[in-house]
Image (tube, rainbow, N blue to C red):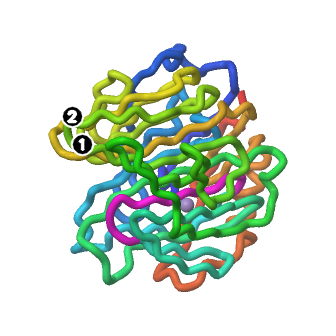
Amino acid sequence: MSNLDPAPQPVTLAPGKAAGPAVHQAPGVLEARKAAVGDGTEVRRLLPQRTLRTIGAWCFLDHYGPDDVSAGPGMQVPPHPHTGLQTASWLFGGLVLHRDSLGTEQLIRPGELNLMTSGRGIAHSEESPARRPAVLHGVQLWIALPAGERFTDPGFAHQADLPVLRAGDATVTVVIGEHRGERSPATVYSPLVGLEVTVPGGAVAALPLRRDFEHGVLAVDGPATVAGLHVEPGLMAHLPTGPSSVQLAPSGGAAGRFFVAGGEPFAERLVMWWNFVARTGAEIAQYRSDWAAGRFGEVSGYPGEPLAAPPLPALPLRPR
Ligand code: MN
């Protein structure tokens, strides 16, 4: 997934200094911004927010679909670079083909995780393959790498065998991290959890939480009640650190799915611009010229040209 905004605003993060009103110290429902990625895929961007830049090290969350992609190009995100992050791709429906500058070519299906570690730099593309199911529905998340890991070697992992557990009425897939003693094989570099939770219609699931984690709970495919808050499909409830469990209940009559992203509050300042995560504006400018000069390597096989980076904003990029 790529940020295709032609004039992306820099996003800076300063832990302990909220950029806006301190509205996120109690549970609340986050707004979503519509954004375009690739050739016609519209997403709802839930992170970053002006007043909430990260949830744990999760620093970017796009939710897309369900979209009928039986006609037209489907998802077509041309080659583009990343730095300083991991991308986690997770589908609720459909099929996506990932290619990257390490030579990886990997299909992803629902219930499987594609986890790409950019480290100091990688390029990738994502596309709907020609033969595909009609409906595409998923999330893409970015995880900021901590200082000690952000220049690590780039890597790619496909995890098709994730722990799935039953807890009362709920079914939980442990995508990232650990839940009720079950651990995902995915490698991450800060205390983090990512779960897909399915709850039958009419049921209420009590999901245990780590009290030192903050969490976002996305209502994936129907209205729901999360920690007593009404959440429309495609929106996310934010839960600050503290509670030891949260109640999840689909409210539309049918079964409901949730994606839970949580982690220990991320203590480092970041500068995010376009598809780069860095610490200074000078690093961002360097990454931009590295991409223009072809220093991220080539993504073979994508039927189209790589994305060009937008112009840098006039004001210098600084972490606040
Ligand atoms: Mn991407």
Q: Residue at 31% x, 77% y: name it.
A: 132
**First-in-chain label (2 vs 1):** 1
Which residue, given by chain and number where applicable, does mark 1 sit on? 222
Disc 2 secondary structure class: loop
| x then y, percent, for residue 99 | 55, 76
Q: Residue at 46% x, 57% y: name it.
A: 164
Which residue, given by chain and number where applicable, does mark 2 sit on? 251
Is 218 one of the magenta-colored residues? no
Seen in the picture, residue 2 relative to 180 is either above or below; the reply is below
127 displayed left or right of 255: right
Label 2 close to label 1 by CB (< 8 Å): yes
Residue 292 in view of the camera = no
Residue 185 in view of the camera = yes
Label 1 is placed on what type of residue? Answer: Gly
What segment carries the magenta color?
83-95
Q: Tell me which image quadrant ligand 1 sits in.
A: bottom right
| x then y, percent, for residue 271 | 69, 40
